[in-house]
Each structure stands twice: as C-alpha cells, then as structure tokens.
Amino acid sequence: MTSLTTAPGAGSTSARPPRPARRSRTGTSRLEPWVYLLPAAAILVGLLGYPLYQLVVTSFYDYRQANVTGGAPLEFLGLGNYAQLFGDAKFWTVLLNTTVFAAGCVVATLALGSALAVLATRVSRWVRSVLFLAALGAWATPAMTGSAVWLFLFDPTLGLVNKTLVNVGLSGFAGHSWTAEKWPAFALVGAEVVWCSFPFVLVTVYAGILAIPSELLEAARLDGASMPRIARSIMVPMLRPIIIIVTIQSIIWDFKVFTQIYVMTNGGGIGGQNLVLNVYSYQQAFASNLYGLGSAIGVVMTLLLLGVTLVYLRLLRRSGEVL
C-alpha cells in the first residue's frame, strides 16, 4: 500500500499560517513625529521667529529715535532702506571685509582643530588631557575677556609680544601698533577668533575619529599605507558629515563676529577700515539712530547665511552623503 504525498504548492490542503497584516501609515501616525516636535517648535518661534519677524518689519520703515521715544508717526519706505544700502559703496566694502575675514577664520579654525584632533589620538593620555584642558579653557573664556587679554598682549608699549620681539633683536617692533593698519588688525582679531573657536572643532573631530573602526585603520597600516594616505583615503571620507557640520557652524559664527572686532579695533578700526557687517549694523542702528537701515543689514546677513547653508546642504545631498 503506497502513501500519496502532495507536493508543496500543488493542491495542498494544509492551511498556511496567516501573514501579519501590514500596519497602514494612517494620518495619525504621520503626524506623530510633529507632535513631539511641537514644544521645541513653539520655543523656537517665540525666541527666534517673532524677533526675526520684527526685524523684517522694521527694515521697511524709516525708524529713528524720534519714533521710539517721541511717538512720532512711522514712515513706510518699502524697499527704500535696501535700495539705500545696496547703493552705498561702503556696504559692499564692508561685505567684502566680512567675507574675507570669515573665510580666513573658518579655514584656520578647521585646519588647527582637525590637526590637533589627529594629534590627540597619537599622544599619551596625560598629554591629551593637558591639551583638552587648555583647549576647553580657551573655549570657555568669554569673548569680551579674551579680546581684552589679546589686546593687552599686543599693546604697543606694555604688551608681552612686542617686548619679546624687541628682546630677541627685532627692534623695529618697539612701540609697534598691531591695529593701526587694516589687514594686520584683521589678522590679530582673526587669531583671537580662531583661538576661542578651534576647541569646538577639536572635540567634535576627535569624537568622530574615535568612532572610526580601529580594524580599518589597522588593516591600512598593515598594507603599508602612510598616515597621510590613511587620513586622505579613510578618515576624511568617514568624517565628511562631521566636517560639514563644523564647517557650517564655523561659517555662521565667524560671519557674525561682533565682540572681537568691536573691542580690539575700537569699534571698527581707524576710519572704519575694520568694519564687518555686524558692527556696521550696530553703528547704523544705535550710533546713527537709523534703526530701519540697521535692521535691513541684519536681514541681508540672515539671508546670506541661510543661502550659504542651503547651498552647502544641496551639494551634500547631490554627493549622496547623509547627515
């Protein structure tokens, strides 16, 4: 007597286990992430959205001290403040100063911070601890305090830098003013900005390096790759999202520098030669009582920074990177 077997799938009467039903993405589930974001969004709208709205509105009016304290009626100018701003040659000079200054600070900050991050992975623990303590001390120093200390170090008569240079035989630096000329003054301020900014890059890039699997680096060393080749072919590609984040942060911070320029160049340098957009906006709004024009400069700065960030993120998406 032979037993008949039924091939799988060929008229089998055995019931298959039911597949779990897929959960449809309902409208409620689609809205769920936004519900969690509502508290943060409400805080951002209150702290950033409303002041930004007021800044834009003010830029459309001839808003002066008489309107603030005297109750004088406002005069609507529309785009008049922007037309005046873009027609002023000084604005374009200040914009160029800001762009060159910010670009130099960003490049120097990224180079110094990344180099020290790589160095921190190759030194002993106590040397690394001293490095991080010194860096975090610079990072924690208020901008006003740091600017005053740097200005005293480079003082023409009492500064330690000039005295040291004279003592080593460079007598031409006796009484030398580091802020009398445009670009030396920008270089001095830029050095202070880099000094208080590179620790952020150092800590962030160092954390990214620690996240790289050690097996990859060890395999590259066994294959005979040099450290520059490892950094170029393995570390930089894996650290690209982190580098992009610190680059955007540095661009925003350095483009908005105010305290260092204002303190170290006494409000923008001789004849305004060291003005940047933030200081220029402050001068127009509070020194000249042209609040509408100062607000227009603030709006232009915001749009420029948003444009740079969006272009950077667009290029990032085209390259296939994911933040």
Image (spheres, rainbow, N blue to C red):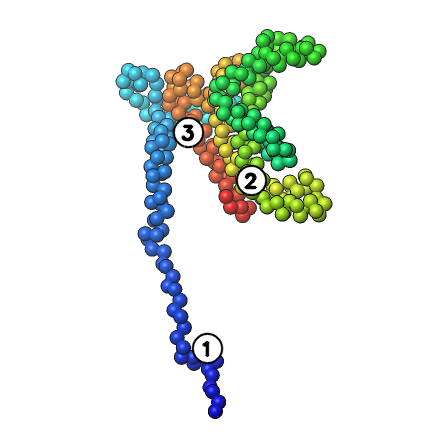
Circle 1 residue: 9
Q: Amino acid at mark 3?
A: Val
Q: Amino acid at mark 1?
A: Gly
Give the labeled residue for mark 3: 299
Rendering quarter of residue 105: top right
Towards the viewer: 212 or 267: 212
Q: Residue at x 36, y 51 (%)?
A: 30
Alpha carbons under labels 1 and 2: distance apart: 53 Å
Helix, strand or loop at mark 1? loop
Q: CA distance from mark 3 to mark 2?
A: 35 Å
Q: Which residue is mark 2?
A: 208
Q: Please, what secondary structure does the residue beneath circle 3 have? A: helix
Instruction: Name the front one of labels 3 and 1.
Output: 1
Q: Report the mark closest to the observer, 3 or 2.
A: 2
287 over 77 or under it: above or below? above
Is residue 208 at least partly visible in the picture?
A: yes
In which image quadrant can residue 170 be found? top right
Asked if one can make out residue 83 in the rendered structure from this viewpoint, the answer is: no
Q: Position of residue 135 (x, y in %)?
A: 55, 27
